[in-house]
Image (cartoon, rainbow, N blue to C red):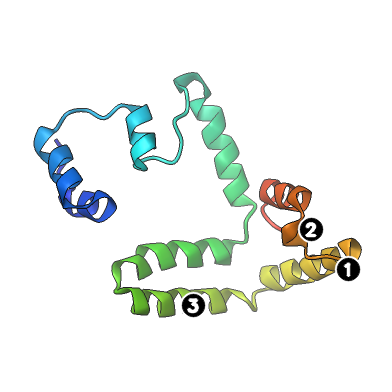
Amino acid sequence: MIFCGQRLARLFGGRRALQISLEGTPISPTEAHEMGLVGRDVPTDALLQEAIEHAARLGRRPKAAVRAVKRAVREGGSLPLEEGLRFEGAEWLSTTTTAESLDAQRAYLARTKELRDVPALAPETLEETAARGRFA
């Protein structure tokens, strides 16, 4: 049994963390997904392809933004909320003047002019952006 009571307590509260830790029974992939321990429950035969596609989607995202989000979650998430929010805000600000960010901002403004509306409110634009990893 791998002991991870501190993390489990933060995810599920003390009662559920104790139950999982003390019982030590295996958790099926479906149960892990339902509990929020994993993001997806992928069939074994589709796992490699899903992992490759997921990595490709993340790889298309601006590198500075990915780093900032990871730091905000990992480091900021361990701080008290007010400090974590300040940390996250500082990380976000650090990404706004990168070349990739400025290109994305220009693309967003161009799309706004093209649609004559807010692109983030158009479902088809959100789908395209999610697939591409950025506004184009």
What residue is shown with label 3?
A: 89
Residue 30: which quarter of the image?
top left
Question: Disc 1 residue type?
Answer: Lys
Q: Residues within 10 Å of mark 1 (few under 14, many from 20)?
A: few
Question: Disc 3 residue type?
Answer: Gly
Residue at image location 51% in from the left, 28% down from the top: 48
Question: Which quadrant of the rendered structure holds the N terminus?
Answer: top left
What residue is shown with label 2?
A: 136
**Left or right, residue 45 beside residue 124:** left
Which residue is the extreme one toward the top? 45
Q: Position of residue 26 (x, y in %)?
A: 22, 28
Q: CA distance from mark 1 to mark 3?
A: 28 Å
Q: Residues within 10 Å of mark 3 (few under 14, many from 20)?
A: some
Which residue is the extreme one toward the front? 15
**Left or right, residue 22 beside residue 111:** left
- Circles 1 and 3, Cβ within 8 Å, touching? The answer is no
Residue at image location 35% in from the left, 29% down from the top: 29
Q: Which mark is residue 126?
A: none
Mark in front: 1 vs 2: 1
SS type, badge 3: helix
Residue at image location 62% in from the left, 61% down from the top: 62
Q: Who is closer to the viewer here, 38 or 35?
A: 35
Which residue is the extreme one toward the left? 22
Q: Position of residue 118 (x, y in %)?
A: 78, 65
SS type, badge 1: helix
Residue 32, above or below 135: above
Q: Earlier in the sequence, mark 1 or mark 2?
A: 1
Q: Position of residue 97 (x, y in %)?
A: 65, 79
Q: Position of residue 127 (x, y in %)?
A: 71, 47
Q: Earlier in the sequence, mark 3 or mark 2?
A: 3
Q: Which mark is residue 113?
A: 1
Residue 99, above or below 19: below
